[in-house]
């Protein structure tokens, strides 16, 4: 088709988005004035510019949202790391308490055994002296007429020493670790060692369970950091709270565990 001066011939138009009013008006003739085509191009350019601006805004919004999410993740991981550090400190304290309880159990058990052995030795010696005194007393009763006065005096003196020694073994205050070496002091001392041993025995399971749960809590906290999971971190805090209660009970024995 021939074109008139100042006009452009359009032989084929394909994929023109949102045609302008001028394009629709001159489409029947197949010829578009240069001005109409120029306006059409400007409309398309303006639309593309608007769409590009919207895309840029969306990119900026997405970038800002991603940065905010990353900051939140970093804050979460920082808090989780602090929780793990606190749990590690408490784990060390629980381990220390458990070690001390074990040492107290062993040491007091040894001291109690030694003190009871000393008490038994004192009791045997006391019994021997009393038996010896009774035997001499019986000898005097049976053969007193045939024994001279000097011999009787010596035997009576010996009987007195035996009985005094036996009485001294009953209570003998002093400055030793038990406050003396008499049977009375040794009995009280051995009983005290046994009470301390039993106290440490009750403490030890609390520290054992506390240590195990602290370790589980630390593992869960580490997993929470890797998975960025608040639920797992919450589980770690629950285990940590139970561990703290058990650790405090290990030191104070506020309640008795159902399991030894």
Image (cartoon, grey):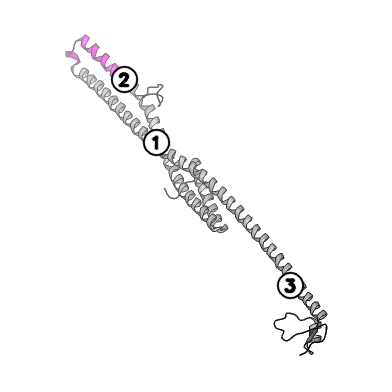
- Label 2 or label 3, whichever lies nearer to me, is 3
Identify the residue at image location x=19%, y=10%: 148
Name the outermost residue toward the left: 146
Identify whether 173 is placed above or below 11. above
User: Residue 194 got which mark?
Assistant: 1
Mark 1 or mark 2: name the one nearer the start of the chain. Answer: 2
* Label 3 secondary element: helix
- Label 1 or label 2, whichever lies nearer to me, is 1
**Residue 224 % position (x, y):** 54, 56
Give the camera-side residue of 158 and 189.
Answer: 189
Mark 2 or mark 3: name the one nearer the start of the chain. Answer: 3
Identify the residue at image location x=51%, y=53%: 222
Q: Quadrant of residue 154?
A: top left
User: Residue 118 got which mark?
Assistant: none
**61 in magenta:** no
Magenta span main SS: helix
**Residue 258 % position (x, y):** 45, 50
- Distance from label 1 to label 2 (Cα)? 28 Å
- Distance from label 3 to label 1 (Cα)? 91 Å
**What segment is highlighted magenta in the picture?**
143-163
Mark 3 or mark 1: name the one nearer the start of the chain. Answer: 3
**Residue 98 % position (x, y):** 44, 42
Circle count: 3
Disc 3 packing (10 Å; few <14; some 14–19; many ≥20): few
Query: Residue 190 vs residue 222: left or right?
Result: left
**158 in magenta:** yes
């Amino acid at each position: 088709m021939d074109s008139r001066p100042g006009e452009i011939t359009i032989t084929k138009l394909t994929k023109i988005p949102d045609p302008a009013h001028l394009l629709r008006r001159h489409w029947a003739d197949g010829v578009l004035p240069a001005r109409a085509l120029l306006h059409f191009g400007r409309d398309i350019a303006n639309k593309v510019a608007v769409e590009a601006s919207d895309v840029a805004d969306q990119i900026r919004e997405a970038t800002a949202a991603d940065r905010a999410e990353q900051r939140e993740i970093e804050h979460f991981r920082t808090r989780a790391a602090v929780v793990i550090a606190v749990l590690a400190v408490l784990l060390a304290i629980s381990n220390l308490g458990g070690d001390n309880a074990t040492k107290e159990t062993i040491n007091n058990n040894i001291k109690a055994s030694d003190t009871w052995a000393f008490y038994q030795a004192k009791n045997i010696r006391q019994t021997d002296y009393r038996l010896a005194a009774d035997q001499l007393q019986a000898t005097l009763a049976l053969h007193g007429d045939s024994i001279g006065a000097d011999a009787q005096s010596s035997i009576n003196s010996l009987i007195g020493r035996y009985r005094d020694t036996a009485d001294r073994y009953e209570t003998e205050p002093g400055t030793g670790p038990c406050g003396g070496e008499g049977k009375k002091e040794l009995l009280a001392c051995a009983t005290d060692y046994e009470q301390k041993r039993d106290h440490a025995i009750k403490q030890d399971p609390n520290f054992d369970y506390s240590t195990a749960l602290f370790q589980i809590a630390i593992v869960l906290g580490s997993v929470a950091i890797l998975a960025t999971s608040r639920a797992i971190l919450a589980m770690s805090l629950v285990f940590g709270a139970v561990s703290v209660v058990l650790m405090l009970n290990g030191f104070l024995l506020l309640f008795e565990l159902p399991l030894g």
